[in-house]
Amino acid sequence: MRVPALSAALLVVALLPAAAHSENGIGIGEPTVVDATGSPITGHINVNQKFYIASEISNSGPENLPFVYIVKVTDGDGATVLLEWFGGEADSGQMLNIAVSWASVAPSTYTVQVFLWDGIHTQNALDSTKSLVIPVS
């Protein structure tokens, strides 16, 4: 099986006041597909079209919390075509807008999963996994 070439980059967009999410104070919002300006892409996505998979991480708890944000993209056959992660610390009362850029090199229906863990080695979920389906042709 041939694995397509990938293009990805991570972008931390902004630090803003947080809204409440999970019971431990830190949470992740539903992923969205946006363009370079942060505007949602609602139309068709083409092969080789660069776009961003964006999520909001917020910490409404009383303490600063370390986290690892993970984005996994699988193609229609279930093969992982993108796996990116970003580690950091969310200050109490802050929200991070994080986006991973990507351009598919093959048409498929891709499934995006985003995870929020306490660390890459400990792998304890800080919030539930969120998913998004992206058709590319």
Image (cartoon, rainbow, N blue to C red):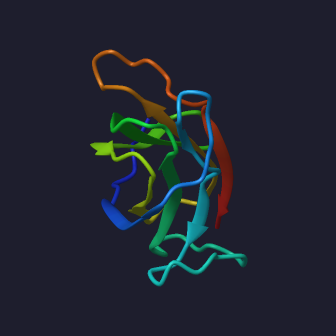
The spot of residue 36 in percent (x, y) is 44, 80
Instruction: Give the residue displayed 29% in from the left and 42% down from the top.
Output: 89
**Residue in the picture at 33% in, 54% down:** 5
Question: How many numbered marks does the figure carry?
Answer: 0
Q: Position of residue 91 (x, y in %)?
A: 34, 47
Image quadrant where residue 2 sits: top left
Judged left or right of residue 73, residue 12 is left
Image point 28% across, 18% down: which residue?
121
Q: Closer to the camera, 125 or 109?
A: 125
Q: Residue at x 62, y 61 (%)?
A: 32
Which residue is more in the foreground, 23 or 8? Answer: 23
**Residue 130 x, y percent position in the rendering:** 63, 40
Residue 50 position, x and y percent, is 45, 73
The quadrant in which the C terminus is found is bottom right
Q: Looking at the image, can residue 86 be seen?
A: no
Can see residue 12? Answer: yes
Q: Quadrant of residue 82?
A: top left
Give the farthest residue toward the bottom. Answer: 37
Q: Is residue 134 shown left or right of residue 15?
A: right
Viewer-proximal residue among 101 and 47: 101
Q: Quadrant of the N terminus?
A: top left
Residue 51 against residue 96 in the figure, above or below: below
Q: Is residue 63 above or below residue 97?
A: above
**Relative side of 31 to 65, left or right:** right
